[in-house]
Image (tube, rainbow, N blue to C red):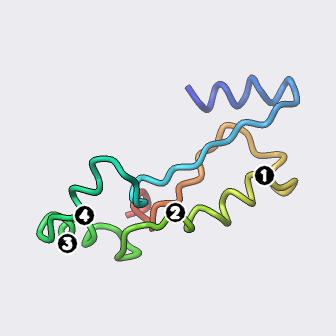
Amino acid sequence: MFRSFGGAASKTGRRRRQRAFPSARCPTPPQALRADPERSAAILGRIPAGRWGEPSDIGDAAVFLLARASDYMHGAAVPVDGGWLAR
């Protein structure tokens, strides 16, 4: 859906992008996973970066998406996930 929306938006001159950051710290159920040492270790073992993401990890990706350098980018997701999707 996002990809098709990005294509349609590009014809109107609007820019639409998204970022993906599933392993970042947030006050939702992942906090419970982080609090459980056994479960947290199992998850961290599958994240190539070997750590939970921090909110600050998305800063550079956000700057890029707001910059003119990304003007020709449409309908793409930029994963900020410590390599989770690339494993």
For the residues marked 1 and 2, what is the alpha-carbon distance in whole angstroms?
17 Å
Q: Nearer the viewer, mark 4 or mark 1?
A: 4
**Sequence order check, earlier mark of 3 and 1:** 3
Mark 3–mark 1 Cα distance, whole angstroms, equals 35 Å
Q: Amino acid at mark 1?
A: Leu
**Which picture quadrant has residue 43?**
bottom left
Q: The residue tagged with tag 4: helix, strand or loop?
A: helix
**Picture quadrant of residue 50:** bottom left
User: What residue did someone put label 3 on?
Assistant: 41
Residue plotted at (40% across, 60% down): 25
Q: Which residue is painted at 75% across and 59% down in the image?
A: 64
Secondary element type, mark 2: helix
Q: CA distance from mark 4 to mark 1?
A: 31 Å
Quadrant location of the C terminus in the rendered image = bottom left
- x and y percentages locating residue 69 in the rendered image: 84, 57
Q: Amino acid at mark 2?
A: Pro
Crowd class of label 4 (few under 14; some 14 to 19; many from 20; radius 10 Å): some
Q: Residue furthest front?
A: 27
Q: Locate the N terminus and report the quarter of the image it occupies.
A: top right
Helix, strand or loop at mark 3 = helix
- The residue that label 4 is drawn on is 34
In the foreground, 83 or 65 = 65
- Mark 3 and mark 4: Cα distance apart in space: 8 Å
Alpha carbon of mark 4 to alpha carbon of mark 2: how far?
A: 15 Å
Question: What residue sits right under mark 1 in the picture?
Answer: 66
Mark 4 or 2, nearer chain start: 4
Relative to 30, is 38 on the left or the right? Answer: left
Please give the residue where the numbered disc 2 appears in the rendered image. 55
- Of the numbered discs 4 and 1, the one sitting upstream in the chain is 4
| Circle nearer the viewer, 3 or 4 | 4
Disc 3 marks a residue whose amino acid type is Ala
